[in-house]
Amino acid sequence: MDEKLGVHGVSVAFPDRARASRRAVLDRVDLSVATGEFCAIIGPSGCGKSTLLSVVAGLIQPDAGTVRFDGHPRHGVSRQTGYMFQRDTLVPWLTARQKVSLDLDPRGLRPPSGICGSVLALPFADASFEVVSAFDVVEHCDPEEAALEELHRVLEPGGRLLMSVPAYQWAWSDHDVANGHHRRYTRPRAVEAVSAAGFEVLRSTYGFSAVFPAFAAERAWRAVQHRAGSSGAQGPADVVDLPTVSSPLERLLLGLCRLDRRALAHRDLPFGSSVFLAAAKR
């Protein structure tokens, strides 16, 4: 029979921070599935089954080897392939029919719940959801229009989009580079992009206004370090480490954010480090 799927010499390694090295998850894996054939991949937890499926679906690029469909190399994601973890519950009180969690990288999900996929080619039928949230997602997508069109497609008519994006291009830093961002936004810029995709914007506001002076100072310091040549990411990182803060500082920052929450009950915020937006599908 003709080969439908061919995996040839695929190897994948992930960073092992404890050993400051890379840990091999897949090592020169070969697999052939013929047209009409069913194939089960069986093995103990942690042996690389999900990683192999992610490579086949185009969600992870292998360090070596190739994946072919119908004899043609697979490059990136496709609506023709996808997979779901074996259990349908994302949280104990909600089923997959009620709520779905999606991430491009399976490490961003909490196995066995969630679906691997790309917002540029969502593995869902048209008009599947009443609400879609995309918090700090769209800035990672290029082209931006394709991501917003996909979010629009999977919403039912009148469905709601909840979205957040980072604010102000002047705040661009090595942190954005390491996180794989393509852009930062102003509130008008976010509203324009969402409206052009077929949404009616119901509300838009900046967020984290009370901590904004500290954010601006931190970004100014990053810029000074970058000009001095003492820091700066050269490209997207596999995993970006978040800074740790002391318990007293954490309580202070959370207290300032509660000021934002009280203000947002009455008005939109005029500035902040993020833009938040709620919209309805027209």
Image: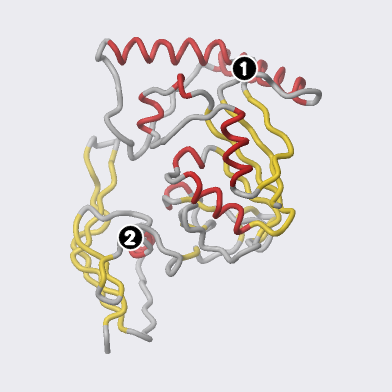
Horizontal arrangement in the rendering, residue 141 relative to residue 69 (left or right): right
Q: Which mark is residue 208?
A: none
Taking the spot 29% from the left edge, 34% from the top edge, the residue there is 235
Q: Which mark is residue 251?
A: 1
Taking the spot 75% from the left edge, 25% from the top edge, the residue there is 264
Per the image, label 2 sits on a secondary structure element best described as helix
Above or below — where is 111 with respect to 258? below
Q: Nearer the viewer, residue 220 or 257?
A: 220
Counting other residues with Cα less than 10 Å from the Cα at mark 1, is it few (<14), some (14-19), or many (20 or more)?
few
Residue 75 locus on image (x, y percent): 30, 60
Horizontal arrangement in the rendering, residue 228 relative to residue 168 (left or right): left
Q: How is the image coloured?
A: secondary structure
Counting other residues with Cα less than 10 Å from the Cα at mark 2, is it few (<14), some (14-19), or many (20 or more)?
many
- Residue beneath disc 2: 55
Residue 22 locus on image (x, y percent): 23, 43
- The three-letter amino acid code for the residue at tag 2 is Val
Above or below — where is 209 with respect to 28? above
Above or below — where is 230 with respect to 29? above
Pointer 1 or 2: first along the chain: 2
Per the image, label 1 sits on a secondary structure element best described as helix
User: From this viewpoint, which residue is outermost toward the right?
Assistant: 266
Distance from Cα at disc 1 to Cα at disc 2? 42 Å
Above or below — where is 20 with respect to 175? below
